Image (cartoon, grey):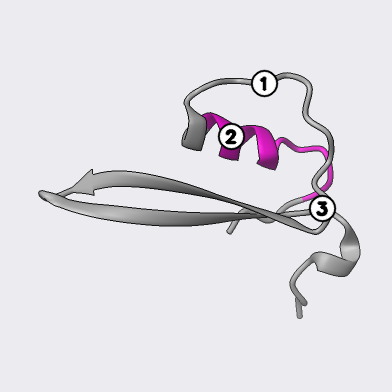
Amino acid sequence: MLVGETGVGKSSLLHRYSEGEFKQDFVGTAGVDMKQKNIEHMSHSVKMHIWDSTGDVKFRPLSN
């Protein structure tokens, strides 16, 4: 899961990693987004689900 402040590039990072391309014109994430990426690790196929959350304060995890 990607978590961070608004506008720091979480969606750009996720898109670059999962799709292999850079897009400069992202619109902010509303709520959450999810991408999937298949990778090979130690001769096993692993399907990763990566969640991208909005930077909005109401979606941030609670901190102590």
Residue at image point 68% right, 42% down: 10
Q: Nearer the viewer, mark 1 or mark 3?
A: 1
Q: Which residue is mark 1?
A: 23
Q: Farthest residue toward the left?
A: 43
Look at label 1 and name its amino acid.
Answer: Lys
Say whether disc 1 or disc 3 marks the residue closer to the N-terminus: 1
Look at label 2 and name its amino acid.
Answer: His
Q: Percent from the top left, x then y, of residue 18?
A: 48, 37
Magenta stretch: residue 60 in it? no
Q: Which residue is mark 2?
A: 15
Q: Residues within 10 Å of mark 1 (few under 14, many from 20)?
A: few
Residue 1 shown left or right of residue 47 in the figure: right
The dot on residue 31 is none
Chain part drawn in magenta: 5-16
Residue at image point 50% right, 31% down: 19
User: Does dot 3 land on a helix, a strand or a loop?
Assistant: loop
The dot on residue 55 is 3
Q: Percent from the top left, x then y, of residue 46?
A: 28, 55
Picture quarter with the N terminus: bottom right
Look at label 3 and name its amino acid.
Answer: Gly
Say whether disc 3 or disc 2 marks the residue closer to the N-terminus: 2
Q: Nearer the viewer, mark 3 or mark 2?
A: 2
Q: Percent from the top left, x then y, of residue 34?
A: 60, 53
Residue at image point 76% right, 80% down: 64
Label 1, label 2: how far apart the Cα atoms are: 8 Å
Label 1, label 3: how far apart the Cα atoms are: 19 Å
Query: In the depicted view, which residue is nearer to us: 49 or 3?
Result: 49
Asked whether the beta carbons under mark 1 and mark 2 sit within 8 Å of each other, the answer is yes
Image-quadrant location for residue 59: bottom right
User: Does dot 2 land on a helix, a strand or a loop?
Assistant: helix
Q: Percent from the top left, x then y, of residue 40?
A: 22, 45
Label 3, label 2: how far apart the Cα atoms are: 16 Å
